[in-house]
Image (spheres, rainbow, N blue to C red):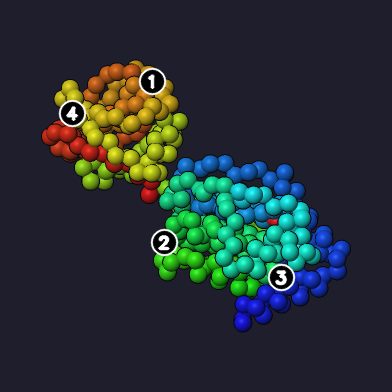
Amino acid sequence: MKKLIACLSALVLFMGLTPAMAEDAVSSATINVAEIPAAGEHPNAAILVVYFSTDDTVRAAARIAADALGADIFEIVPQTLYTTEDLNYNNSSSRATREQRDETARPEIVSLPENLQQYDTILLGYPIWWGQAPKILYTFLESVDVSGKTIIPFCTSASSSAGSSARNLQTLTDEATVWLEVKRIDNRSTAEEIRAWALSLNLTQGEKNMQMKINGIPVTVAWEDNESVTALQELAADGLTIQMSMYGGFEQVGPIGQRLPSNDTQTSTSSGDIVLYSSSQLVVFYDSNSWAYTRLGHITDQTPEQMRELLGNGSVTITLTME
Ligand SMILES: Cc1cc2nc3c(=O)[nH]c(=O)nc-3n(C[C@H](O)[C@H](O)[C@H](O)COP(=O)(O)O)c2cc1C
């Protein structure tokens, strides 16, 4: 009953707009989305902005927020795109209106985000359709595992409040998922207002670092800033395990499982150095050697004696994760 009243009041409010206002509100985002850069891929990002948009308003807000937060961005794309007629809210049998009335409607999605486990926080953006989130948001939440993550819902609308839209989405996730208060963004909001809201969330990006363990023992590594390390971080985001073996009395070497970009130069290594050999082998030294390698990093918290103790007593397993 409550749901029905909320839906009806959204409808009355929304339909209460003069046709010209409603038309303007629905069809034109105040911000030109083409001017906002799409967020890049950040292998270390802990924040993902997920959004669904049919007319650029949510898209603009999502891009502004992702840009302000240095977050990655993912668009929920319907398998069957919505035509203008599908979105006609004046037609009681248009696709969007029918879906919103149908408890079981779950429009199909083209693809789901990869590496969702990389993110701690998800900003989830959607337009208000008849007082609620479009049903494709339901499809999304029922298709992904967001347990343990923090979700910050935001919606755009012509006039309606966020109402119960986020609460209804929350019922699709488990108790370990933390939902913060929903933000309603007016169709006429400016880019500056949206940016200010994103920054007010005080989400420190909490950059993740690549963590290395040798036989389960964590070691501190000062990683190089090069494309080989970036590629390794992308593998580590899924968790990377490398079986190493002793070689030459000064190193442990093991296959990464694929080729990484490399920039080999003649290198004299010392205890604690980590290098890429032949584009596809990880090498960790407990003594020195000279060869053509690409430097990856250096273990900073182990003495040469401790390195020898860790690596000089038979094969080890190295794990790399982003934490
Ligand atoms: C099918 C449909 C239903 C809508 N229902 C409402 C509503 O109940 N209340 C409201 O204020 N706006 C409503 N709107 C307007 C949208 O919420 C608003 O224009 C939103 O910002 C569009 O986001 P987008 O441009 O990213 O698709 C509706 C729009 C459509 C297409």
Question: Are discs 3 and 4 less than 8 Å apart at CB?
Answer: no
The residue that disc 3 covers is 160
Q: Image check: 261 left or right of 86?
A: left
The residue that disc 2 covers is 148
Q: CA distance from mark 4 to mark 1?
A: 22 Å
Q: At label 2, which amino acid type do we have?
A: Gly
Q: Tag 1 or tag 4, which sits nearer the N-term?
A: 4
- Which residue occupies 82% across, 61% down? 23
- Which residue occupies 39% across, 35% down? 232
The residue that disc 1 covers is 264
Q: Tag 2 or tag 3, which sits nearer the N-term?
A: 2
**Quadrant holding ligand 1?**
bottom right
**For residue 263, above or below residue 230:** above
Q: Image check: 122 left or right of 241?
A: right
Q: CA distance from mark 1 to mark 3?
A: 59 Å
Q: Position of residue 155 (x, y in %)?
A: 64, 63
Asked whether residue 187 is in view, the answer is: no
| Tag in front: 4 or 2 | 2
Question: Are discs 1 and 3 less than 8 Å apart at CB?
Answer: no
Q: At label 1, which amino acid type do we have?
A: Asp
- Of 27 and 80, which appears nearest the observer? 80
- Which residue occupies 71% across, 77% down? 9
Q: Position of residue 129 (x, y in %)?
A: 68, 65
**For residue 75, above or below residue 10:** above
Q: Tag 1 or tag 2, which sits nearer the N-term?
A: 2
**For residue 202, above or below residue 226:** below
The residue that disc 4 covers is 246
Q: Tag 4 or tag 3, which sits nearer the N-term?
A: 3
- Of 188 and 28, which appears nearest the observer? 28
Q: What secondary structure is marked by label 4?
A: strand
Q: CA distance from mark 4 to mark 2?
A: 39 Å
Q: At label 4, which amino acid type do we have?
A: Met
